[in-house]
Amino acid sequence: MSTGDDVDEGVRTMLLLMPRLVGAAKRIKPPPELAGFDLAPRHLSMLAYLLFDGPMGVTELAGRLEVAPATVSLMVGDLSRQGILERREDPGDRRRTIVGVTAEHLPAIQGWLGHSAGAWRTALEPLSPAERRTFVDTLLAYERALSGAGGG
């Protein structure tokens, strides 16, 4: 049975841990091949989806990122102009645009995001599927609570 003290200790631990996690994530710099590009944190989620799930449509990408398709279109346009992403017409539906990482930049992006993916894999593999779900659900609940509190 959990007591308030257990929760308070968990809160204390997380409050001390989160700045270190954020700091460690910020120290993961883009590889030299990508250093000259204007990559913002908002681009990382998009690149991660495209890396792990492969090329997809703008509308599907917007749904996964939980933003408007127009927002994704702007980000895709920006990264396409920089040569990081490529857009192509869906052969099955000419109205649909498929977005993917260019072959030229795929290895650099895989290496860059792969480091974080490997760290998460190391942390999550020992857990049971139910424990992994609880962990992810807990982080999502924290994000929702923080956003609902106005960030502070």
Image (spheres, rainbow, N blue to C red):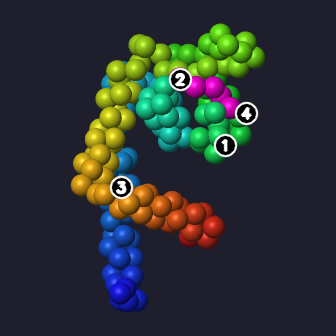
Which residue in the structure is indicated by mark 2? 55
Q: Which one is in front in this view, the residue at disc 2 or the one at disc 4? A: 2
Q: Tag 3's secondary structure? A: helix
Q: Quadrant of residue 63?
A: top right
Amino acid type assigned to the residue bearing label 3 in the image: Pro
The reply, left or right, for residue 88 in relation to residue 132 is right
Q: Quadrant of residue 93?
A: top right
Of 96 and 74, which appears nearest the observer?
Answer: 96
Q: Which one is in front in this view, the residue at disc 4 or the one at disc 3? A: 3
The residue located at (50%, 39%) in the rendering is: 45
User: x, y percentage for residue 81?
Assistant: 59, 17
The reply, left or right, for residue 69 in relation to residue 88 is right
Q: Is residue 74 visible?
A: no
Give the vertical position of 45 relative to 136 (above or below): above
Disc 1 and disc 3: Cα gap in Å? 28 Å
Residue 129, which numbered label? 3
Magenta-drawn segment:
55-59
